[in-house]
Image (spheres, grey):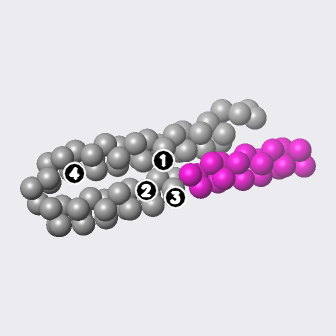
């Protein structure tokens, strides 16, 4: 392996790792939204269906951000730099 190839491989690995940092934000977002929804359902059980619907939408959007980070990481690893 030449030095240029090693630098390219290291750059791809570092870039993919940095791209996956956003997945941690998705995990934190899901945890906080579920925590708030469960507290709200415990305080006001009459609005549980409405709160649950909004919570599921929020979890889906937070998870989408984590999936986008994964896709970008995989693109950096396997597509760019041949």
Question: Circle 4 sits in a helix, a strand or a loop, which is it?
Answer: helix
14 falls in the magenta region: yes
The residue lying toward the viewer, choosing from 10 and 46, is 46
Which badge, 1 or 2, is on the more N-terminal residue?
A: 2
Identify the residue shown where x is 66% and y is 32%: 79
Judge whether 78 appears above or below 24 on screen: above
Residue marked by disc 3: 24
- Total label count? 4
Measure how far apart labels 3 and 2 are at the Cα level. Answer: 9 Å
Judge whether 46 appears above or below 78 on screen: below
Residue marked by disc 1: 66
User: Is residue 40 visible to us here?
Assistant: yes
Residue marked by disc 2: 29
Which badge, 3 or 1, is on the more N-terminal residue?
A: 3
Of discs 4 and 3, which sits in the foreground?
Answer: 4
**Residue 40 placed where, x, y %?**
23, 62
Of discs 4 and 1, which sits in the foreground?
Answer: 4
Is 3 situated left or right of 40 in this image? right
């Amino acid at each position: 392996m030449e030095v240029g190839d090693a630098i390219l491989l290291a750059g791809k690995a570092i870039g993919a790792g940095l791209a996956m940092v956003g997945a941690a934000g998705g995990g934190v977002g899901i945890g906080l939204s579920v925590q708030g929804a469960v507290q709200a359902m415990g305080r006001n059980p009459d609005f549980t269906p409405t709160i649950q619907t909004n919570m599921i939408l929020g979890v889906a959007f937070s998870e989408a951000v984590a999936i986008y980070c994964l896709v970008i990481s995989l693109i950096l690893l396997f597509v760019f730099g041949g």
